[in-house]
Amino acid sequence: MTRLALIRHGQSQWNLENRFTGWVDVDLTEKGVAEAKKAGDLLRDTGVEFSACYTSVQKRAIRTLWIALDEMDRMWLPVTRAWQLNERHYGGLTGLDKAETAEKHGEDQVKVWRRSYDTPPPAMEAGSEFDLSKDPRYKLYGADVPATESLKLTLERVQPYFEKEIAPRLKAGESLIIAAHGNSLRALVKILFNVADDDIVHVEIPTGNPLLIDLDGNLKPTDARYLDEARAQPLPDAG
């Protein structure tokens, strides 16, 4: 049985502050660290032997994976970092308080920016304090830093990476862990479960709660479950 574990990073400081985070590299809160430890405990208790791990180049996902692997006593597993697994870029909304943004622009407009499939927020201005176009990590990885992204645009960078780098390993029978972000993981769920554009925006990915997916030889889910049942969210039909 091939298994894929998806872990959204534990609570970050800007999750706690209710701010749009996107590509800003904020760290975990104490609660986020605790969520990552529990994620590792839950994965260890499954008894699944994973072959390798993938994560983004953002510290909240990387640290979540480190902590989980430590709890699993699997710190030696190979880890690949990929900017394609980064969170969605929130453009000009980055850093703003979500409630204050709704008051300024109206709840309906903010809902469109946050939850529509293909409508991105306003672009980030060049030279903004959150402009990462000159960040050395993206120069190293050869990434074009976006000015804004919708979920559709996020999917357009996640899917080719998944199909080229991750899917072949799953088809070969390896079980893998991906520690990433709400929207990059939502993109993966859309791919694996063949979720319609209008439906994927309603799929919620809880922080620090591993989603363990059983896959057949064609990478079709035959079963899927959140390991922390008390914090589980509804999933698309598997298989």
Image (spheres, rainbow, N blue to C red):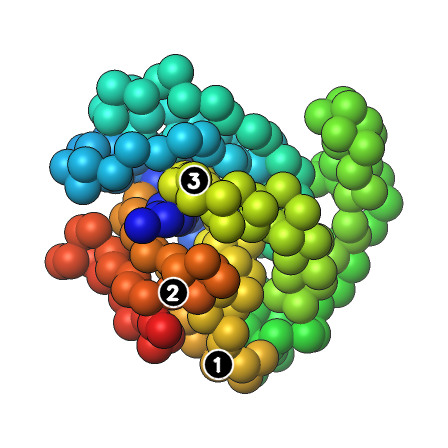
Q: Earlier in the sequence, mark 1 or mark 2?
A: 1
Residue positioned 51% across, 68% down in the render: 190
Residue 174: assigned label = 3
Residue 199 image label: 1
Q: Nearer the viewer, mark 1 or mark 3?
A: 3
Residue ID at (81%, 33%)? 142
Q: Would you say residue 226 is visible in this rendering?
A: yes
Q: CA–CA distance between discs 1 and 3?
A: 29 Å
Answer left or right for 119 relative to 173.
right
Q: Are marks 1 and 3 in contact (CB under 8 Å)?
A: no
Of label 1 and label 3, which has the lower sequence position?
3
From the top left corner, tell me how far across and down residue 39 is, in percent: 25, 39
Which of the numbered marks, if any, corresponds to residue 221?
2
Q: Position of residue 12 (x, y in %)?
A: 41, 40
In the displayed structure, would residue 37 be above or below residue 209? Answer: above
Apparent side of residue 36 relative to residue 28 in the rendered image (left or right): left
Crowdedness near tag 2: few (<14), some (14–19) or many (≥20) residues, C-alpha within 10 Å: some
Badge 1 element: helix
- Closest to the camera, between mark 1 and mark 2, is 2
Q: Earlier in the sequence, mark 2 or mark 3?
A: 3
Q: CA distance from mark 2 to mark 3?
A: 15 Å
- Identity of the amino acid at label 3? Glu
Q: Position of residue 81 (x, y in %)?
A: 59, 30
Q: CA distance from mark 1 to mark 2?
A: 18 Å
Figure check: 137 above or below 97: above
Taking the image as shown, residue 19 lies to the left or right of residue 156, namely left
Identified at 82% across, 42% down, the residue is: 144
